[in-house]
Image (cartoon, helix red, strand yellow):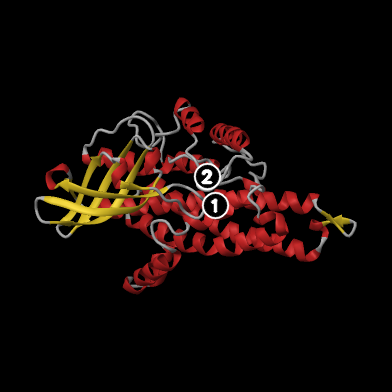
Amino acid sequence: MTALAGGVFGTDGREDNDAELRQLVDDLGQLAFDARLGHRGLPDRFDADLWRILEDAGLTRLTSTPDVDAGPRELAMTLYGLARHAGSVPLAETDLLTGWLGRQTGIDLPEGPLTVAIADGDTDGCRITGTARSVPWARSCAAVLLAVRIPDGLRVGLVEVPPSSLQEDHNLAGEPRDSITFDLPADQLRAVAPALGEELTRRGAWSRCVQIVGALDAAAALCVNHTRERVQFGRSLSAFQAVQQSLAGMAGEIEKARAAAELAVTAAVEHGFDSADTDYAVTVAKVTVGRAVGPVTTVAHQLHGAIGVTREHPLWLFTLRAQSWAEDYGTATHYARRLGRLALAAEDPWDLVAAT
């Protein structure tokens, strides 16, 4: 049973040792989705009720709490399940990114939702200045952990964000993506190994691949239900061969994305996020998942017709999220070029593929 099983395709009746966690996340996600149905817009709002429920269930810091026996697999199932219900909470940012980086750098983090701001900065030796752009959920978080790349390395520190330094914005799906301008004493930020910055980006890319598969599964489920229920010329849309071919093509793209994302999850479980195996698997996943987003979202809106582009229909909650997430932490094109460089650098490119 894969960590990302679900959606239209279910579990095929096989034994699922993680059924309880999947069901819990699905129930909580569905509850939050139903509560906000008809009240979603641009920009979207942080779902404080869902966050409180997730905290009570112990799901907000699965991998960053030492005494919780959970890892990338459990977090992947949670991220995937919430993405299938368009959960508006910064779970990946709080646990996988900020929680991990805080532990690695010895920075005490407050309770509540957290996010990490990644930026390039300038320094004169005394102060560090710059602007962190597209920071997820900054306006709604209890704290922001700043990771700044400067010429002499990487600096990390917890920062306060006064309203005057924060410019609110949102991505295509309406999720908050704010800009934070900073001008800080250099000694307020800790110098850390540059490798932590590379792993931070890898973790972010990994999380978005998992979330995209969840969003695409949700879009596919809406398409299957719509084509079964919509009657045209005396029969359901799903009875037409062209529609069946479109659904089959969509399923194929999603399954390619799922397989690549599952490889990344397995690599993280077996080797950790700081390994070359996981680096390769995440690179492959970012390319494969990113390239699936366009065909799947296009077909999904074609099958829904005019209703699929309205804000009243929930399809946009998933297709726009998938498109937005595909741009986070590097585009598919960026990772495709990186994959090409990895293959060229390998003594035997086949060994690169077969070893993972």
In the picture as drawn, the residue positioned furthest to the right comes out as 234
**Residue situated in front as seen by the camera: 340 or 351:** 340
- Helix or strand or loop: what does disc 2 sit on? helix
Which of 33 and 164 lies nearest the eye of the viewer?
Answer: 164
Reply above or below: 69 against 334. Answer: above
| Mark 1: few/some/many CA within 10 Å (<14, 14-19, 20+) | many
Q: Position of residue 69 (x, y in %)?
A: 40, 32
Write down the residue under mark 2.
80
The answer to which of 301 and 331 lies nearer the viewer is: 301
Point out the residue furthest to the left here. Answer: 125
- The residue drawn where x is 34% and y is 36% is 64
Which numbered disc, 1 or 2, marks the residue that appears first in the sequence? 2
**Residue shown at the point (70%, 59%) measured from the top left:** 247
Is residue 229 in view from this perspective? yes
Q: Is residue 3 above or below residue 227?
A: above
Which residue carries the number 1 mark? 213
Which x, y percent locates residue 188?
16, 42
Amino acid at dot 2: Tyr
The C terminus is located in which quarter? bottom left
Total labels drawn:
2
The quadrant holding residue 352 is bottom left
Q: Outermost residue toward the bottom?
A: 344
* Percent x, y of residue 67: 35, 28
**Other-residue count near label 2 (Cα within 10 Å), few / some / many at <14 / 14–19 / ≥20:** many
Q: Are marks 1 and 2 in contact (CB under 8 Å)?
A: yes
Relative to residue 215, is residue 129 drawn left or right? left
Mark 1 lies on a secondary structure that is helix
Q: Is residue 237 left or right of residue 314?
A: right
Residue at figure coordinates x 82%, y 58% from the top left: 239
Residue 95: tell me if it is visible: no
Residue 336 appears in which quarter of the rendering?
Answer: bottom left
